[in-house]
């Protein structure tokens, strides 16, 4: 099969190789998926740049979508031919979705609704599941106010859509270049964090009370919002990232006197019940045709280095995917 891989850390064009390697065979409990698309996420490029390799050769990317080609022992033959999307393709294993085929445990291949494209399927494992779990941690959100930071990002776009679909009032932060994406996602108010005082605007929009919850992509900057009283008493921040890979100071008095809650999670490491709940909720939205999927750039498999550079550059609005078949 055709695949892309790297055998050392480094710049995309220096270390990524595209060539032929053996097609895997599904082991017991596994399915073999012929991939149509592969999602390229920031965590994929960070791994390629500097995270220690878990094996001599790494086929990158955790997200993708395709059709089950074969099944291993113990998997129902009826799954052959099923359209699926994948999660954790390259999590704690060397072979991800940047290839024509992938073999992985059958639970990691989720049925893709007929009306949902393979392009969209490549956006679900990390961006959409992260957003869904973040919103579910805030439940119930109906008629409550949620602040989504970075609403113009892939996760923020989905988080805004999902929170709105579940009845929340959504305030969003976004740069001018990404503000329209946040509006299309349904944000009730978009705050230009580059020119506006986010805390002041959020407090004004909530008549001084603050928001009930924050879905946050960068704790290193959002801690200032906590100190500034953006979270209402008994409010909760759910975080999934930080632009500073180090300790981040948080105001203890603000947390204590506000009875505030901080929750963090890694989407790769969700518990079985948490993931099942998020997958089921996401499937319901896909079947209803509720979600809009923003594809910012498409590349061929042999253009994987350019795809990684597009993600690293941060200028693409929307998800970056590889078209494999």
Image (spheres, rainbow, N blue to C red):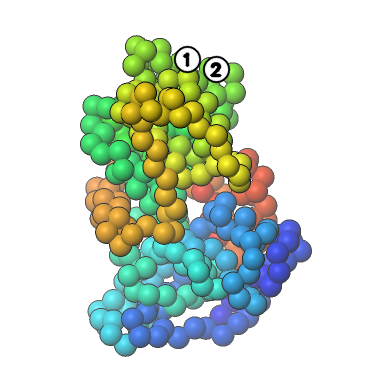
The image shows residue 183 at horizontal and vertical percentages of 42, 28
Does residue 191 appear in the picture of this structure? no
Percent x, y for residue 170?
36, 28
Label tally: 2
Kindly state the secondary structure of the residue where label 1 is placed: helix
- Which mark lies nearer to you, 2 or 1? 1
Asked which quadrant contains residue 253, the reply is top left
Q: Is residue 41 left or right of residue 32?
A: right
Q: Residues within 10 Å of mark 2 (few under 14, many from 20)?
A: few
The residue singled out by tag 2 in the image is 196
Residue at figure coordinates x 36%, y 31% from the top left: 260
Q: Position of residue 207 (x, y in %)?
A: 34, 11
Give the residue drawn at x 55%, y 31%. 221
156 with respect to 234 (left or right): right
> Are there few (<14), some (14-19), or many (20+) residues within 10 Å of tag 1?
some
Asked if disc 2 and disc 1 are in contact, CB closer than 8 Å, the reply is yes
- In the image, taking residue 68 as reference, residue 52 lies left or right, namely right
Query: Residue 278 has which mark?
Result: none
Q: Is residue 171 above or below residue 249?
A: above
Q: Residue at x 43, y 20 (%)?
A: 229
The residue that appears at 57% across and 51% down in the rendered structure is: 42
In the depicted structure, whether residue 116 falls above or below residue 106: above
Which one is in front, 186 or 233? 233
Q: Which residue in the protein does label 1 denote?
A: 200
Pick the front one: 183 or 260 = 260
Foreground: 254 or 314? 254
Mark 2 to mark 1: distance in Å? 8 Å
Reply above or below: 28 against 199. Answer: below
Give the residue furthest to the right. Answer: 14
């Amino acid at each position: 099969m055709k695949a892309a891989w790297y055998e050392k850390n480094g710049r995309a064009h220096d270390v990524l190789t595209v060539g032929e390697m053996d097609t895997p065979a599904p082991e017991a409990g596994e399915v073999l998926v012929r991939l149509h698309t592969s999602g390229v996420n920031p965590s994929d490029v960070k791994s390629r740049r500097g995270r220690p390799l878990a094996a001599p050769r790494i086929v990158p990317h955790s997200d993708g979508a395709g059709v089950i080609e074969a099944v291993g022992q113990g998997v129902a033959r009826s799954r052959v031919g099923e359209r699926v999307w994948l999660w954790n393709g390259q999590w704690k294993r060397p072979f991800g979705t940047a290839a024509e085929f992938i073999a992985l445990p059958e639970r990691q291949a989720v049925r893709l609704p007929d009306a949902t494209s393979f392009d969209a399927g490549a956006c679900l494992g990390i961006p959409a599941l992260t957003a869904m779990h973040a919103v579910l941690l805030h439940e119930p959100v109906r008629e409550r106010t949620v602040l989504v930071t970075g609403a113009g990002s892939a996760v923020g776009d989905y988080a805004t859509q999902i929170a709105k679909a579940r009845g929340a009032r959504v305030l969003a932060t976004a740069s001018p270049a990404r503000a329209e994406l946040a509006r299309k996602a349904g944000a009730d108010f978009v705050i230009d964090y580059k020119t506006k005082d986010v805390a002041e605007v959020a407090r004004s929009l909530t008549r001084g009370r603050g928001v009930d919850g924050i879905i946050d992509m960068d704790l290193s900057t959002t801690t200032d919002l906590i100190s500034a009283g953006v979270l209402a008493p008994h409010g909760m921040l759910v975080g999934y990232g930080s632009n500073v890979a180090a300790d981040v100071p948080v105001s203890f008095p603000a947390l204590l006197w506000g009875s505030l809650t901080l929750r963090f999670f890694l989407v790769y490491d969700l518990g079985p019940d948490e993931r099942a709940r998020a997958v089921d909720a996401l499937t319901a939205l896909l079947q209803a045709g509720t979600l809009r999927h923003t594809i910012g750039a498409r590349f061929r498999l042999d253009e994987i280095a350019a795809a990684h550079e597009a993600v690293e550059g941060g200028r693409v609005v929307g998800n970056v995917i590889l078209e494999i078949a």
